[in-house]
Image (cartoon, rainbow, N blue to C red):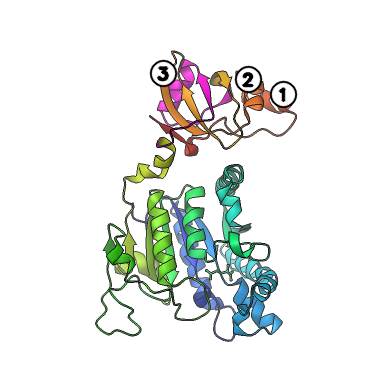
Amino acid sequence: MDPAVCPRLVVKIGSALLVDHAGTVRTDWLAGVVTDIAERRSQGQQIVIVSSGAIALGARRLGLERGGRASLEDAQAAAAVGQVALAGVWEALLAAQGLIAAQVLLTLGDLEDRRRYLNVAATIARLLDLGAVPVLNENDTVATAEIRFGDNDRLAARAGQAAGAMGVILLSDVDGLFTANPASDASATRIPVVKALTPDVMAMATGETKSGMGSGGMAAKLLAARMAGAAGIALAICDGRVDRPLTHFAASGGGTLFLPPRSAKGRKAWLAGRITVAGTITVDAGAASALRRGASLLAAGVRAVDGPFQRGDVVAIVGPDGELLGRGLAGYDADDAATIMGLRNDAHAAALGYAPRAAMVHADHLVLI
Ligand code: GLU
């Protein structure tokens, strides 16, 4: 699906676009991006922002050399200072368009661990339902060297998966993927659409960043495209140096669009492909037909729970006659699932002793076989 028009979109904005060489926010340009976002929101598109710039902004305030990237300690300190400023900028600009900013700071572990992944997914979904605009960044201050995304390109791809987005746009200081590095090779031509990330395509990228400010480079963007594609998400790299870059991208036909290798359903393919399941949830006929209509699995329709499984584990969902209906990520541990099975949602809090979740298995994390 074209990222320009998909119902839920992740837009990633790199440091080099957000912060100028003096280390200040490019507010006028960013206000144009926010105007684009507000326009798309009013047309019904939900938008999640992934914003870099914390390290670059913090480095300026702390007087750190090499843009705060001379050492990991510098980068982590710079991020702590810069993130405050960054959040303030987003809040002010979104508020000027009548929109509410929500800050979400993530580490790689938050999306690798299934339970935390589900929590992140649920929080982003709730924020979007409430009409807020989630603004994500890596939690650079606490992420350790071995377990970090390292660049926000990959964070955007993974967050796109957690957010249930069908498209990711990376606003960049280049207008997409070129056959060679356009900065040093005048014969380089832009590739408008990439259908498969073959070794030849991967070889077109270098790891350098033009600005020296971000940490991405084209190599990281291609890895992000691969991650997005594996989750069935289309990813575009496009020129962010222009005013109103999202409008420009939609109108110009520029940039490079990476199509996911499978159909849009591929987002759930990894679930369908799982052979081992941690448990089984048996549902009644009413729940089985609701699932076929695309609904989430609610506890009221559950007849039996076979564990042990934990929240976030893959479980098989079977119908009243034992037929396999699908697989999904369990919203509850097996014990709690057994406690609330058969109960309507309004009885869950009393049975569990804590605020219940929306579903036993959410439709976003469920695939029918
Ligand atoms: N998270 C980093 C920041 O806010 C940026 C990472 C990147 O350059 O992609 O500065």
| Among numbered discs 2 and 3, the one appearing first in the sequence | 3
Residue found at x 58% / y 60% = 135
Q: Position of residue 26 (x, y in %)?
A: 55, 78
Q: Nearer the viewer, mark 1 or mark 3?
A: 3
- The residue at which mark 3 appears reads as 323
Q: Is mark 1 within 8 Å of ligand 1?
A: no
The quarter of the rendering in which ligand 1 is drawn is bottom right
Q: Is mark 3 within 8 Å of ligand 1?
A: no
Give the crowd class for mark 3: few <14, some 14-19, many >=20 residues within 10 Å. Answer: few
Q: Is mark 2 within 8 Å of ligand 1?
A: no
Q: Position of residue 219 (x, y in %)?
A: 41, 69
Using residue 210 as the reference point, say whether residue 18 is left or right of it: right
- The residue at which mark 1 appears reads as 351
Q: Looking at the picture, does residue 298 appear above or below residue 203?
A: above
* Disc 1 from disc 2: Cα separation: 9 Å
Label 2 residue SS: loop
Residues in magenta, as a range: 273-300
Q: Nearer the viewer, mark 2 or mark 3?
A: 3
| Three-letter amino acid code of the residue under disc 2 | Leu
- The residue at which mark 2 appears reads as 343
| Three-letter amino acid code of the residue under disc 1 | Ala
Q: Looking at the picture, does residue 16 appear above or below residue 131?
A: below
Label 1 with label 2: CB-CB less than 8 Å? yes
| Residue 163 in sight | no
* Disc 1 from disc 3: Cα separation: 29 Å
Q: Position of residue 72 (x, y in %)?
A: 64, 72
Label 3 residue SS: loop
Label 1 residue SS: helix
